[in-house]
Image: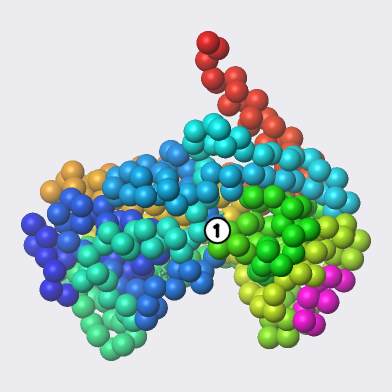
Amino acid sequence: MTTTNQNQQRIAIIGGGPGGLTLALILQRNGIPSVIYEREREDKSHERGGSLDIHEDSGQQALKEAGLYDEFQQAARYEGEDFRLFDKTGKAYIDEVVDEEVPGGHGRPEIDRGVLCDLLLSKIDPAIIRFGYKLDKAVSLPDGTTELHFQNGIVETADLVIGADGAFSRVRPLLSNTDVSYSGLTMLELNVIADLHPDLAAFNHRGKMFALDDNKGILGQLNGDGRIKVYASFKAERHWIEESGIRADQPQEAKKQLLKIFKDWDESLQNYIRYAEDSILPRRIYMLPVGFTWQRNQGVTLIGDAAHVMSPFAGEGVNLAMQDAMELAVAIVRNKDQAKAIEEYEEKMYEYSSEKARESNDNLILCFSENAARKLSDLMNSYLERSNESVPAE
Ligand SMILES: Cc1cc2nc3c(=O)[nH]c(=O)nc-3n(C[C@H](O)[C@H](O)[C@H](O)COP(=O)(O)OP(=O)(O)OC[C@H]3O[C@@H](n4cnc5c(N)ncnc54)[C@H](O)[C@@H]3O)c2cc1C
């Protein structure tokens, strides 16, 4: 690695997802060079995951710090905050339509993951990104630096290594023996082209639809590219996918089997499976223990999913990844002493991320319990009442 910053520190960011890209961009804006090592041969963010809601107090703050807030506002879908909640009979518990006249909506506009990464990439010096660098292992050296061994055979050394390499981080083992565990939730990701199915598009509205019952769920989410991403979700044993006989390489058959599993669900909900294109992506949802911390190392730290992967039921994953990136970058800029910067960042991050991890885990349990739709609607209404109470009367 050849790049050095003012203090001759070589900063290596492993992973070019939303967290790693945000970090590199904020450092760049502050004149601090870094290098991103990304395992994919090119940017694959359009193929990975769907629409993300970006929160006012975290993801949006990071975008401001990265100098991208105006561009984000133009690309964001404020109407994507619409939310509908049903049980399996099609009984509606929540039917929220965002008033487009209200500036900023509810403060959680949607953007597709690919569009978000494109925005970040558009401002990052392309010379600092190395595609096709999959980290195999990282080794701490006696002088406090870290040796990075990539699958392409190249070995680099860095003074500060930041693991932004997601749930299955190869950097995390330098800091802890704790590994991710299966959360008990399995999802099968499907896609419906909204324009081809106007009845479903009308049912789904412009944002998210959750149908929850019998420890299962059908979740729909309209993306900016016109696809409705569908997650057929189950509380299930770790090897349920293999044991169920549902095979992603036989999508037609798999859809028939899925429809059997949801056979007593309302037609309008079954349509999310019936109308799906012929591709199915199984996803086991993994998590780190709530409140996960590690042995401090002044040359290595983690951000985003590498630091605190959690189930997506608080909608916080990408927001935390970007907030971590901002907090770490600001700490590096503020402190000449790298050890101090890491300490400052980690202490702050442990506090806010553990709170969100707890919330996410509580929501996961609630969403796959008995009478989940009613319970989730009660919870959301109580949040709403509390936030209305905290608005001072005019
Ligand atoms: C089904 C699902 C739905 C979700 N919905 C939401 C939502 O609605 N809202 C929300 O906020 N979050 C959601 N999330 C979570 C969100 O996608 C993640 O929290 C977020 O992407 C984390 O960003 P990150 O940059 O930390 O890691 P990632 O996005 O995982 O990026 C990691 C990057 O590192 C690269 N990489 C991995 N290993 C290596 C290696 N060994 N060497 C080099 N590079 C490597 C990867 O290719 C990738 O580019 C969802 C997740 C799932 C699975």
Residue at 48% from the left image edge and 61% from the top image edge: 113
Res. 237 in view: no
Position of residue 307 in the picture relative to residue 84 (left or right): left
Magenta-colored stretch includes residue 110 = no
Amino acid type for the residue under numbered disc 1: Gly
Q: Position of residue 102 (x, y in %)?
A: 54, 31
On the image, which quarter does residue 73 sit in? top left
Q: Position of residue 150 (x, y in %)?
A: 31, 82
Question: At which x and y percent is residue 202?
Answer: 74, 53
At 58% across and 59% down in the image, what residue appears?
A: 223
The residue that appears at 32% across and 69% down in the rendered structure is 14
Residue range corresponding to the magenta coloring:
252-260
Give the residue pinned by disc 1: 224
| Residue 257 shown left or right of residue 304 in the figure | right
Provide the major secondary structure of the magenta segment: helix
Quadrant in which the N terminus appears: bottom left
Circle 1 — which element?
loop
In the orientation shown, which residue stands out farthest toward the right? 264
User: Which of the 4 image quarters holds residue 163?
Assistant: bottom left
Q: Nearer the viewer, residue 102 or 153?
A: 102
Residue 110 appears in the rendering: yes
103 relative to 33, above or below: above
